[in-house]
Image (tube, rainbow, N blue to C red):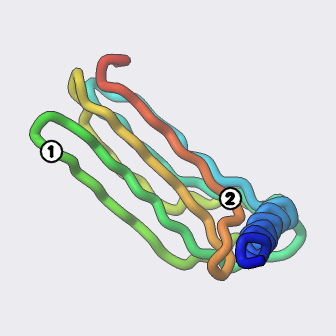
Amino acid sequence: MHARLIVSIVMCLVLNIVGVMGQLPVKAWIVMESEVHSYLLKANVQNVGHNSLTLRYIFEVTKKERAGDTKTIQKGIFTVLDKSISSLSESRISLSKGDKLMAKLLIYQDNLIVAQDSVVLQGDNY
């Protein structure tokens, strides 16, 4: 009985999140510009709908290296006009051989994720 109730609640939450992600006309992506041994990461969002939207974002960049991990988190509330693209944030980070870089962009409406993107790079790839 309890197992069915828990499964039902989880399914409702999953369907609710999937439903919202499919309903809002929002796209998110991370642009990477490569420089010598470093990258400039830009968090972008696009509203392809006909109404302005006020949303929240979290842009998290993590660098793992032998000496330890470095993490930066940038977040805020923004309004994106209808049929427009907005640049939300930028992060510049150096990358050496053996380092690992992970960037994650999450766009929220209330507490539900409505768009997202992520990037993972190995320092051996430059």
Instruction: Give neighbour class at mark 2: few <14, some 14-19, many 20+ (Cα, 10 Å).
Output: many
> Residue at (31%, 33%) from the top-left corner?
100
- Whether residue 95 sits left or right of residue 61 in the image: it is left
- The three-letter amino acid code for the residue at tag 1 is Gly
Of residue 91 and residue 5, the one placed in the foreground of this image is 5
> Residue at (65%, 53%) from the top-left corner?
28
Residue 112 is drawn in which quadrant? bottom right
**Callout 2 touching callout 1 (CB < 8 Å):** no
Of residue 41 and residue 111, the one placed in the foreground of this image is 111
Residue 21 in view, yes or no = yes
Q: Is residue 53 above or below residue 25?
A: below
- Whether residue 44 sits left or right of residue 15 in the image: it is left
Residue at label 1? 68
Of residue 108 and residue 82, the one placed in the foreground of this image is 108
- The three-letter amino acid code for the residue at tag 2 is Ala
Mark 2, secondary structure of its residue:
strand
Q: Is residue 119 above or below residue 44?
A: above
**x then y, percent, for residue 20:** 80, 68
> Residue at (55%, 78%) from the top-left corner?
77
Of residue 25 and residue 122, the one placed in the foreground of this image is 122
Nearest-to-viewer mark from 2 and 1? 1
Instruction: Give neighbour class at mark 1: few <14, some 14-19, many 20+ (Cα, 10 Å).
Output: few
Residue 121 is drawn in which quadrant? top left
The image's mark for residue 44 is none
